Image (cartoon, rainbow, N blue to C red):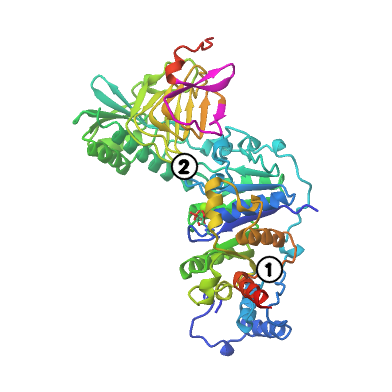
Amino acid sequence: MAMNRIIVVTSGKGGVGKTTCTANLGMALAKAGKRVVVIDADFGLRNLDLLLGLENRIVYTALDVLAGECRLDQALVKDKRQPNLALLPAAQNRSKESITPEQMKKLVRALSKAYNFVLIDSPAGIEMGFRNAISAAREAIIVTTPEISAVRDADRVIGLLEANDVKAMRLIINRLKPAMVEAEQMMSVKDVQDILAVPLLGVIPDDEQVVVSTNNGEPLILGKELTKAGIAISNITRRLQGEKVPLMDLSAPKESFFKKLRQLFT
Amino acid sequence: MGNGNDQPINSNSSDNPGDIERDRVEANTSASASPPRKSVKASPKNASKSSRAALSARLKRSKDVELFVFDETDQGDENTSPLVDVSTIDLDVDTADSQPKQQITLKSEQGRLLLLLPSSSTTSFAPSEWEELCQQLTLRLNSGDRFLQPNTTVHLIARDRLLDGRQLQEIDELLSAAQLHMKRVYTQRRQTAVAAVTAGYSVEQNTKLDHFNQSPDAGEALDAPLYLQATVRSGTEIRHPGSIVVLGDLNPGGSLVAAGDIFVWGRLRGVAHAGSEGNADCRIMALQMEPTQLRIADKVARAPEKPPAHYQPEVAYISQGSIRIAIAADFAQLPVDTP
Ligand SMILES: Nc1ncnc2c1ncn2[C@@H]1O[C@H](COP(=O)(O)OP(=O)(O)OP(=O)(O)O)[C@@H](O)[C@H]1O
Ligand SMILES: [Mg+2]
């Protein structure tokens, strides 16, 4: 049964991993057989095309569609690796004010007729670009890192989402460093959730491989062997689709080290 | 706890009636039913404000985190219609409020400079359009400043656009920074004329300005080439109804759109579109051709997957219906098909 879902990925604070999450979730959902369109709502600072490695295939942008210069499907960039995935690019040379929430709604509504999932990559901040990004969303994924500043901004955004009637909210905690949490140098998952009080969709550990995949334009989730961050994203994707997947144990390396040690001595 | 917005920080929840009492009851229920540590609980059906408060209360009482568990009703959506083909979707767009693609133009004519504002279907400037226009003007002034003689007179061709005193002053300030002096304003608008007179400029109202109205109609002669000494950075798009010469790099994320040829005396790494009005004979030339994308007339091409071992000046042109790239030194010898 098709339930077309419109999900905005947002954070308040910049650089916490919204675009990384959108690209990977989009790819993972597409791999799982869903028809997915990811929308870059970061006008003027678009990145989603880069992370997906689709930059050189963009001919038209959302603005060209709105200006009547091309049809909606002409602006969609299809992913060769994954035909279920399409990208609606933002304009790079225009400001966030060049599109209105009404226009965004129009685009998103139309796309939701043709795709199971519409994922919207929100820009940082709470201004026009953010308002555009959330205008058509039915669900929101709040991305934060375990830092007070990011959590504070996420809290503000949650308030704004509630005020805008986006009620189905879930939390992704990104870039967690288990060793630092254990040394009580970093907020724990529990600390963050205590403040935000939003159901947890998943925790993604800090992982150098994320940077590598960003630079290659190959979402992590496409890797042959998934790293921990990749597994975390894959779990999140499954939860989004209704599977019950327990949180993975991020402190595992230590334990397995002791296990190995024990094996050595027995 | 929670987000702390709902009540003063010092309030003692046990003194408060109503909502808070109910939350406590809910919280108690779930706390007593809460499974032992390391387990994962289902979240309530709707993540609405009250359920967030309940979640918050549960979190206070438990050492666990609470994982989202999907629930059909979470979506609260009756939309179960089958997917349609996206190519069948016709977006009914209102093109009236889309912004013009024309940019600001500086032309020299009989020893003075003409500054032409882009024409548009809307007469007044939206704040974002105005900001972009000022950025364009700054870029054009900075990147061409070797050719701008100090103390040159500038005439502003405002067409039918509405300008107020502040906007006129803003343009004047940008021009003054480049040691240019705005003297006269041509306008078809009474309101703009009044603002200009008040600000001390001489005004020409209702003058026939047909020869300034660069219309994008086919068959028109191209403008004089636009010469820029600049790095065209990500997010910058330069459009010109003629050829564009850039003395500098075109960075990834930047774009050049020219009705004529494009010549980059540097590295071309962004998007370049020559013959944008449809002229397929136009060419793109660069010292180092590493484009994100090249377009000539209505043809689009991506750079080859493998970059060459070393770069040398190259020319992109259309041959047999597609874009090709040739080494500049060889290009003159190539049999280019001419119509
Ligand atoms: N789990 C992770 N481990 C390591 N690095 C990460 C992780 N997640 C994101 N990053 C890095 O953090 C940086 C910012 O990520 P990203 O661009 O996704 O954030 P953003 O929230 O979209 O930023 P912006 O607010 O600017 O749009 C990138 O360099 C990315 O590689
Ligand atoms: Mg981003």
Q: Where is residue B125 in the image (x, y as percent from the top left)?
A: 41, 40
Quarter holding the N terminus of chain B is bottom right
As rendered, which of B94 and A226 lies closer to the eye? A226
Instruction: Check the image and report above or below for A28 versus B236.
Output: below
Quarter holding the C terminus of chain B is top right
Query: Where is residue B40, by image quadrant?
Result: bottom right
Q: Position of residue B154 (x, y in %)?
A: 25, 29
Q: How far apart are marks 1 and 2 (CA)?
A: 37 Å
The residue indicated by pointer 1 is: B68
As rendered, which of B119 and A160 lies closer to the eye? A160
Q: Are marks 1 and 2 on the same chain?
A: no
Bin the neighbour count of mark 1 within 10 Å (Cα to Cα): few under 14, some 14-19, many 20 and up.
Answer: many
Q: Position of residue A93 (x, y in %)?
A: 46, 40
Q: Residue furthest bottom?
A: B15
| Residue type (three-letter) at the residue carrying disc 2 | Arg
Please give left or right for residue A161 compared with residue A113 in the image.
Answer: left
Please give left or right for residue A240 compared with residue B20 in the image.
Answer: right
Instruction: Check the image and report above or below for B306 versus A84.
Output: above
Q: Do the residues labelled 1 and 2 touch (CB within 8 Å)?
A: no
Query: Where is residue A232, by image quadrant?
Result: bottom right
Residue A136, visible in the rendered structure: no
The residue indicated by pointer 2 is: A94
Instruction: For mark 1, name the chain.
Output: B
Instruction: For mark 2, name the chain.
Output: A
Disc 2 is placed on an element classified as loop
